[in-house]
Image (spheres, rainbow, N blue to C red):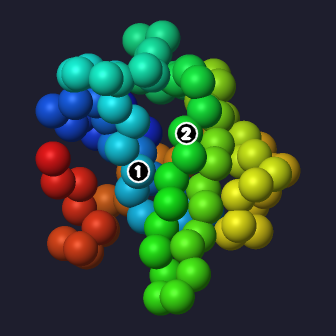
Amino acid sequence: MSAKLRPARVGFWHWCPACLTVHIIKVRGDGVCWEWDGDEEAPTFTPSFKVSLPQGDIVEICHYVITRGEIYFCSDSTHGFEGQTVPLADFPLDLPPAYTPQD
């Protein structure tokens, strides 16, 4: 696997530079609606992903599209990266156990 993606039973994990954690992209299994182009270094996944992350009394939203190895954060994201496009980050090598992908 590439430096950008980690395999999961149902798809792939990637590091989100906006949320400073991992997100899973499900491309296999029942009810999955995302597609992957097969490129491990500069992947495209469709359609967009929307992740809700509880932060105490509020819920942070991370809504993004990955195209040709770049993440575009949609305008309804609430973490400060909204409207920005950044390269898909390499997976950090020194993740603490709490951030290590689990299936």
Residue 41 or residue 60, whichever sits in front: 60
Mark count:
2
> Label 2 belongs to which residue?
49
Image x and y of residue 85, in percent: 77, 44
Image x and y of residue 20, in percent: 50, 68
What amino acid does circle 1 point to? His
Q: Which mark is residue 81?
A: none
Image x and y of residue 91, in percent: 39, 51
Image x and y of residue 69, in percent: 60, 30
User: Helix, strand, or loop for circle 1?
Assistant: strand
Q: Is residue 55 above or below residue 28?
A: below
Is residue 3 visible to us here? no
Residue 78 or residue 16, whichever sits in front: 78
Q: Counting other residues with Cα less than 10 Å from the Cα at mark 2, is it few (<14), some (14-19), or many (20 or more)?
A: some
Q: Counting other residues with Cα less than 10 Å from the Cα at mark 1, is it few (<14), some (14-19), or many (20 or more)?
A: some
Q: Residue at x 17, y 54 (%)?
A: 102
Q: Residue at x 48, y 67 (%)?
A: 53
Q: CA distance from mark 2 to mark 1?
A: 10 Å
- Tags 2 and 1 touching, CB below 8 Å: yes
> Position of 35 compared to 100: left or right?
right
Q: Residue at x 23, y 54 (%)?
A: 101
Which mark sits nearer the N-terminus, 2 or 1? 1
What amino acid does circle 2 point to? Phe
**Where, quadrant-wise, is the N terminus in this rendering?**
top left
- Mark in the foreground, 2 or 1: 2
Residue 59 or residue 2, whichever sits in front: 59
Tell me the quarter of the picture where residue 88 sits.
top right
User: Helix, strand, or loop for circle 2?
Assistant: strand
Q: Residue at x 45, y 22 (%)?
A: 34
Q: Which mark is residue 23?
A: 1
Q: Is residue 48 above or below residue 15?
A: above
